[in-house]
């Protein structure tokens, strides 16, 4: 999701691939020298694309011939999925932060907690769910950074933490989504203000987005193979 390769056309007739950079850490510029073949404008390395039925189905880079890049399907594209995922995590993080802040405000001004029964349980559970989802996603970010900065972690020593995190992700993301949907259903049927109703729907959508990302990127499972 965060490392999707993007190909962009430039005004000078060249193209750039965001992950293929030169010694200056800037994306190289590629100029077409033959149909669907490009050469580095500042060097001799080349890109080549394979076209089927008028569409590019993959392209390769001659310095790394074992690496092939293929278009992702629309339902996997970071173009729309990444902004929604970030927005969902922001909503969940704000909900988590609002929990202690609202409690402190009520205590400071002596305001009584008005919700009771199922509404009160759902209100508390959805905040716990938001906290757990944010915590698990931070654990994934930490794990990715650990592997990126120290390749020694790639191997059997990572199997245990990876399996544990994938199992935990399944429990947390699926459970949190169920809680979020239940909370939205209760709030929409209640007489609470429209702001609360809109926010409950946004939270339910945020849980669904996180679960969707976890499923298509194989963050949920019971093995180290993902």
Image: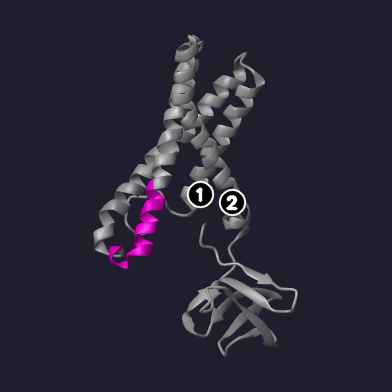
Residue 189's image quarter?
top right
Mark 2 = which residue? 81
Magenta part of the protein: which range?
139-153
Q: 10 Å neighbourhood of mark 2: few (<14), some, or many (≥20)?
A: some
State yes or no: discs 1 and 2 in contact (Cβ < 8 Å): yes
Image position of 110 (left or right of 8): left
Q: Which mark is residue 172?
A: none
Against 43, is 172 above or below? above
Distance between the Cα atoms at labels 1 and 2? 8 Å
Q: Nearer the viewer, residue 160 or 114?
A: 114
For mark 2, give the secondary structure: helix
Question: Residue 42: x and y, percent?
Answer: 60, 86
Mark 1 = which residue? 213
Image position of 73 (left or right of 23): right
Query: Which residue lies most toward the front here?
Result: 108
Question: Residue 187: x and y, percent?
Answer: 57, 20
Q: Nearer the viewer, residue 226 or 115?
A: 115
């Amino acid at each position: 999701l965060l490392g999707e390769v993007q190909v962009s056309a430039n005004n000078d007739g060249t193209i750039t691939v965001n992950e293929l950079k030169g010694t200056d850490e800037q994306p190289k510029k590629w100029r077409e020298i033959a149909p669907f073949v490009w050469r580095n404008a500042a060097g001799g390395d080349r890109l080549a694309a394979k076209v089927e039925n008028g569409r590019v189905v993959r392209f390769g880079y001659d310095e790394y011939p074992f690496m092939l890049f293929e278009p992702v399907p629309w339902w996997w594209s970071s173009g729309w999925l990444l902004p929604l995922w970030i927005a969902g995590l922001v909503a969940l993080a704000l909900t988590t932060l609002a929990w202690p802040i609202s409690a402190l405000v009520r205590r400071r001004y002596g305001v009584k907690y008005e919700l009771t029964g199922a509404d009160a349980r759902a209100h508390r559970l959805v905040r716990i769910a938001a906290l757990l989802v944010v915590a698990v996603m931070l654990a994934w970010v930490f794990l990715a950074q650990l592997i990126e900065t120290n390749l020694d972690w790639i191997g059997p020593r990572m199997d245990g933490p990876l399996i544990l995190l994938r199992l935990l992700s399944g429990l947390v993301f699926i459970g949190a989504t169920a809680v979020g949907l239940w909370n939205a259903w209760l709030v929409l049927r209640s007489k609470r203000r429209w702001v609360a109703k809109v926010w409950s729907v946004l939270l339910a959508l945020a849980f669904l987005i996180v679960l969707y990302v976890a499923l298509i990127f194989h963050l949920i499972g019971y093995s180290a193979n993902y």
